Amino acid sequence: PLPIVAIIGRPNVGKSTVVNRLAGVQEAIVYDEPGVTRDRTYKPAYWRDREFMVVDTGGLVFDDDTEFLPLIREQALTALAEASAAIFIVDGMTGPTGGDLEIAEWLRQQPVPVLVAVNKCESVEHGIMQAMEFWELGLGEPYPVSGIHGSGTGDLLDELLKLL
Ligand code: GDP
Ligand code: MG
């Protein structure tokens, strides 16, 4: 079986955009689980002759138990349980938020290596500054990327392959 990479993060940070960028294809395998409205989507991805699956997950929110949020947390946990590595996507335009810090703390308790990808860093010089702010998550070097432009994903993927 191919190694699995779980994509984790708050709503609207650009998880799905980054997944589509990494996978480079739009087709997804959606695992239907009865009673689960926010299914995980698996997409095959390739980098430097290596193949793996990226799993998109719903936006993680810890301080709110309304609607489907507890279910999404369960989904993220399920994705992490089978993952060889996780990419924690954060929003370089907002900078670190309380929600990011909560997710970071939760991720540190999981037995999976984590890479921090700082999305929405279209401007390369500014992106380096934006990414620096996320050292405070305590999860190592933050990698600036832009899911929309595709910039920065090469460095992120090179680092990712070391973990698979
Ligand atoms: P998700 O909820 O984390 O899956 O986020 P989405 O992928 O649905 O994106 C949320 C919003 O962020 C959308 O309006 C995207 O167009 C925007 N977005 C995603 N990636 C980027 C990026 O690299 N740069 C900018 N500026 N916006 C982005
Ligand atoms: Mg999404």
Image (cartoon, rainbow, N blue to C red):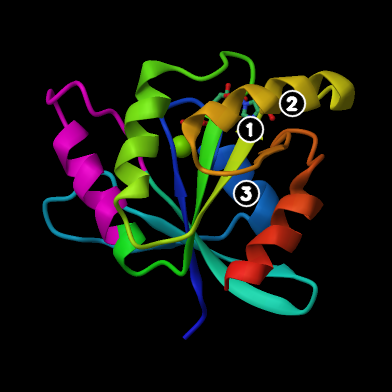
Q: Position of residue 53 (x, y in %)?
A: 53, 68
- Dot 2, how many residues are within 10 Å of its Cα: few (below 14), some (14-19), or many (20+)? many
Residue 71 falls within the magenta-colored stretch: yes
Q: Position of residue 102 (x, y in %)?
A: 32, 29
| Residue for badge 3 | 20
Q: Is mark 3 within 8 Å of ligand 1?
A: yes
Q: CA distance from mark 1 to mark 3?
A: 16 Å
- Dot 3, how many residues are within 10 Å of its Cα: few (below 14), some (14-19), or many (20+)? many
User: Which is more toward the observer, 61 or 16?
Assistant: 61
Q: Residue at x 12, y 26 (%)?
A: 65
Q: Residue at x 72, y 37 (%)?
A: 145
Q: Is residue 62 left or right of residue 126?
A: left
The range drawn in magenta is 58-78
Q: How many marks?
A: 3
Assess whether mark 3 and mark 1 are in contact (beta carbons under 8 angstroms): no
Query: Could one spot residue 45 in this view of the protein?
Result: no
The secondary element bearing badge 2 is classed as loop
Q: Residue at x 51, y 76 (%)?
A: 3
Q: Amino acid at mark 3?
A: Asn
Q: Is mark 1 within 8 Å of ligand 1?
A: no
Q: CA distance from mark 1 to mark 2?
A: 7 Å
| Residue for badge 2 | 121
Assess whether mark 2 and mark 1 are in contact (beta carbons under 8 angstroms): yes
User: Which is more toward the observer, 7 or 109?
Assistant: 109
Q: Is residue 61 left or right of residue 20?
A: left
Q: Nearer the viewer, mark 1 or mark 3?
A: 1
Q: Amino acid at mark 1?
A: Val
Tell me where residue 147 sits by quadrant.
top right
Q: Earlier in the sequence, mark 1 or mark 3?
A: 3
